[in-house]
Image (cartoon, grey):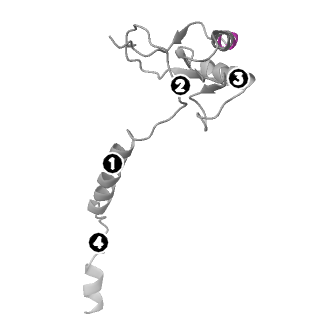
Amino acid sequence: MSVSERRKRRMMSDINVVPYIDVMLVLLIIFMITAPLITQGVRIDLPQAPSEVLPPSEQEPLVVSVDAAGQVYIDLGETPDAPISEQTLVNRVAAVLKYRPQTEVLVEGDRGVDYGRVVEVMTLLQGAGVSGIGLITEPSER
């Protein structure tokens, strides 16, 4: 090839995206299969009561859990399955409500926990600025 022929040829600068699409589809399938298998949170034996399902909301509610030992958990942060102190609960809930004031707060208390402990947690939530608190139950077996 002469020098004049090399100058006329241009380099091809197209990117072949087909392998990237294949990888993305494989990742999508993997996440679709594994997402339902992952269970998060704390094991709570909820009391049964006749109740209705909440209508869907744009914002996810903030769920505070009280296990049978009376330890408090919140589904927020890096470790939602680790117990937190009362002061940490108040701080985290207040921070969430500062940025998202319309966030619903739900409390799920284990069937075996003392009723007074659930009321203490609800009082802490009110102190953090929560105006309305919902309680989570399992539907009755009728």
The amino acid beneath tag 4 is: Met
**Majority secondary structure in the magenta region:** helix
Distance in Å between CA atoms under marks 1 and 4: 31 Å
Label 1 belongs to which residue? 28
Q: Is residue 135 above or below residue 1?
A: above
User: Residue drawn 58% across and 18% down?
Assistant: 112
Assess whether mark 4 and mark 1 are in contact (beta carbons under 8 angstroms). no
Q: Earlier in the sequence, mark 4 or mark 2?
A: 4
In percent of width and height, residue 118 lies at 63, 13
The label nearer to you, 2 versus 1, is 2
Q: Is 125 within the magenta?
A: yes
Label 2 belongs to which residue? 44
The label nearer to you, 3 versus 2, is 2
Q: Which residues are magenta?
A: 124-128
Dot 4: element:
loop
Residue 39 or 93: which is nearer the viewer?
A: 39
The label nearer to you, 4 versus 2, is 2
Label 4 belongs to which residue? 12
Residue 23 or 17: which is nearer the viewer?
A: 23
Label 3 belongs to which residue? 91
Q: Is residue 139 left or right of residue 21?
A: right
Q: Is residue 126 above or below residue 72?
A: above
Distance in Å between CA atoms under marks 3 and 1: 36 Å
**Quadrant the N terminus occupies:** bottom left
Label 1 CA crowd tier, 10 Å (few <14, some 14–19, many 20+): few
Q: Quadrant of residue 2?
A: bottom left
User: Residue drawn 54% across and 21% down?
Assistant: 62
In percent of width and height, residue 103 lies at 53, 17
Q: Earlier in the sequence, mark 3 or mark 2?
A: 2
Q: Earlier in the sequence, mark 1 or mark 4?
A: 4
The amino acid beneath tag 3 is: Asn
